[in-house]
Image: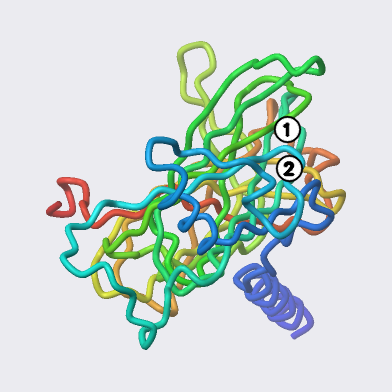
Amino acid sequence: MKKLYLILSLVLTLCLLCSCAEEALPEYIISNYDEESRLDLNDLINNNDSEMNSSTETSKDNSSDSELSDSESSVSEPSYDESDNSKDDSKPDENNGSLLIKQKKYTYDGNDLIILDVTNESNGNYSITINGTYLDESGNVLKTEKKTFDQFSAGYKNYFLFKPEIKFSQFTYTVEVNKTNAPCYAKDVKYNFLGLEENADAIVENDKLVWRPAIVAAMRYGYVGTVPVQAFMKCVLVNESDEIIAIFEKAPVLEYDPNPEGKEHNPIYISPSDKLDWPDNMEGTIRAFVVIEKVTDKLPDRYGG
């Protein structure tokens, strides 16, 4: 009877552990941003119409209610063939609002990277392009990089990840904004980080496949849209010291599933031996956020796309 009691206690403990692992952890919220800018869309678009017909740049003095220490911004619109250019004041102007852009620099894997937290504080849908420039201590350009996300629907927030695989001193950027009438699927993509777990993964050693203990990130993806899509994203894991400990790419194909079950394991550390010693930077509570880079209804062939 005592043996049976011990077995039942063990089973109950395992069930409780599994239950805890299935619970989603709160999303990591970046604190103490290095810079923050709020760009008035209506002013930018008016400036674009009247002053920048052949240019896509505006100075930072005209682009924001707050100072832009290292950034500039620009807005361009698609051209329309309108016979009546009069403004109907009875209709709400979707350009009334702003873009809130927050910037944070991190060190990861021996190099520097930038996270831009961008929120569309307007009633319009936009495609946003960030033109980033990496500078050394003397202000010399080390590298440039351009990233576009075309589904900033009204009120939507997303991140841009600038990861140049170099060390740099400064990061500056310009912003291009275009109105869009294309479907905005990104707002319907949901995700949960369930924590780190011990598992196993295979590596090639001496031309043989060898299984080693591993630390994996458990993720779950949901979707509340009606059109099946594929979401390309980068998952960023952060420890209790606000250090980025892992970044991995995912591209799940999603169909309507507001309350998904199960989970997906993503290896982030594979032990070099048969014993798993957790790295110090992976101890404690790990949280995550996701950078959605593209969402498309054009599916891979195996899904009938």
Q: Is residue 30 left or right of residue 305?
A: right
Residue pictured at 77% horizontal, 48% vertical: 35
User: In the rendered image, which quarter is residue 64 located in?
Assistant: bottom right
Q: Secondary structure at mark 2?
A: strand
Q: Quadrant of the N terminus?
A: bottom right
Dividing the picture into quadrants, the one containing residue 80 is bottom left
Q: Which label was assigned to residue 108?
A: 1
Observer-nearest residue: 100 or 247? Answer: 100
Q: Position of residue 149 (x, y in %)?
A: 43, 49
Quick one: label 1, few (<14), some, or many (20+) residues within 10 Å? some
Does residue 175 appear left or right of residue 134 in this picture? left
- Near mark 2 (Cα within 10 A), the count class, few <14, some 14-19 or many ≥20, is many
Q: Find disc 2 in the rendering and name its residue.
A: 244
| Residue 36: x %, y % from top left | 74, 53
Q: Is residue 259 left or right of residue 35?
A: left
Residue closest to the far top: 206
Q: Is residue 275 above or below residue 288?
A: above
Expressed as whole percent of the image width and height from the top left, the position of residue 207 reads 46, 13
Q: Are marks 2 and 1 in contact (CB under 8 Å)?
A: yes
Give the amino acid type for the residue marked by disc 1 in the picture. Answer: Tyr
| Residue at figure coordinates x 31%, y 57% from the top left | 253
Whole-angstrom CA distance, mark 2 to mark 1, is 6 Å
Q: Residue at x 72, y 41 (%)?
A: 245
Residue 227 appears left or right of 106: left
Instruction: Residue type at mark 2: give it.
Output: Ile
Nearest to the observer: residue 102 or residue 274 = 102
Using the image, determine if residue 53 lies above or below residue 62.
above
SS under mark 1: strand
